[in-house]
Image (spheres, rainbow, N blue to C red):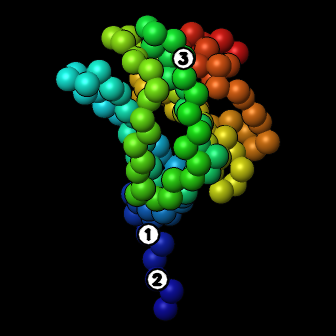
Amino acid sequence: MASKPPPPQGMREIVRQFFALRRGTAPRVTATLLHEPDTAESSLELVNEGGPVVQVRCLIKGDAGAQEVTIGTLGPGESTIVQLHEQIGESIECVWTGLDPQGRLHVWSYEGKHVRLHKGSEIDLPAALEQMYRGAQ
């Protein structure tokens, strides 16, 4: 005797769970600016809450100027703290990029935006900052 197919709600849940398993492979990198008021030193902590990401780079633009930082590789659950060479000031704009295992470039902003480019697409950090903060294409 053949079993009955699952109800539509059950099938939707199976599909949802299947795609949830794949979601874990995409990198999700967040950044937090750490500022020590006593020493006027700043650092940036990056945390990867998703899958592996390589060639991570960051551009921080503040009142005092801009600074590019190369981070490297962040595995799942890894974090790193990068010392900044200049004071940042009050208003900052910050973007970081990295490649996922499929070779797609991800771009994140300090405001919480995220864009995944097509495989093989590239963007430099100043252009990424313009796109994320001013909507330039």
- Left or right, 41 with respect to 94, comes to left
- Residue 116 drawn at (x, y percent): 62, 37
Depicted 1 relative to depicted 76: above or below: below
Depicted 96 relative to depicted 51: above or below: above
- Residue 131 drawn at (x, y percent): 62, 17
- Left or right, 87 with respect to 61, comes to left
Q: CA distance from mark 1 to mark 3?
A: 56 Å
- Left or right, 119 with respect to 78, comes to right
Residue pictured at 36% horizontal, 12% vertical: 89
- The foreground one among 44 and 40 is 40
Q: Amino acid at mark 3?
A: Ala
Tell me the mark number nearer the camera, choosing from 1 and 3: 3
- Residue at which label 2 appears: 3
- The foreground one among 2 and 108 is 108
Q: Amino acid at mark 2?
A: Ser
Residue pictured at 73% horizontal, 39% vertical: 118
Task: Determine the image quadrant of residue 124.
Answer: top right
Q: Amino acid at mark 1?
A: Pro
User: Of all residues shown, which one is farthest toward the left?
Assistant: 38
Does dot 2 land on a helix, a strand or a loop?
A: loop
Residue pictured at 57% horizontal, 53% vertical: 73
Residue pictured at 59% horizontal, 48% vertical: 72
Depicted 82 relative to depicted 42: above or below: below
Does dot 3 land on a helix, a strand or a loop?
A: strand
Tell me the mark number nearer the camera, choosing from 2 and 3: 3
- Residue at which label 1 appears: 6
Tag on residue 32?
Answer: none
- The foreground one among 131 and 11 is 131
- Residue 98 drawn at (x, y percent): 61, 42
- Residue at which label 3 appears: 66
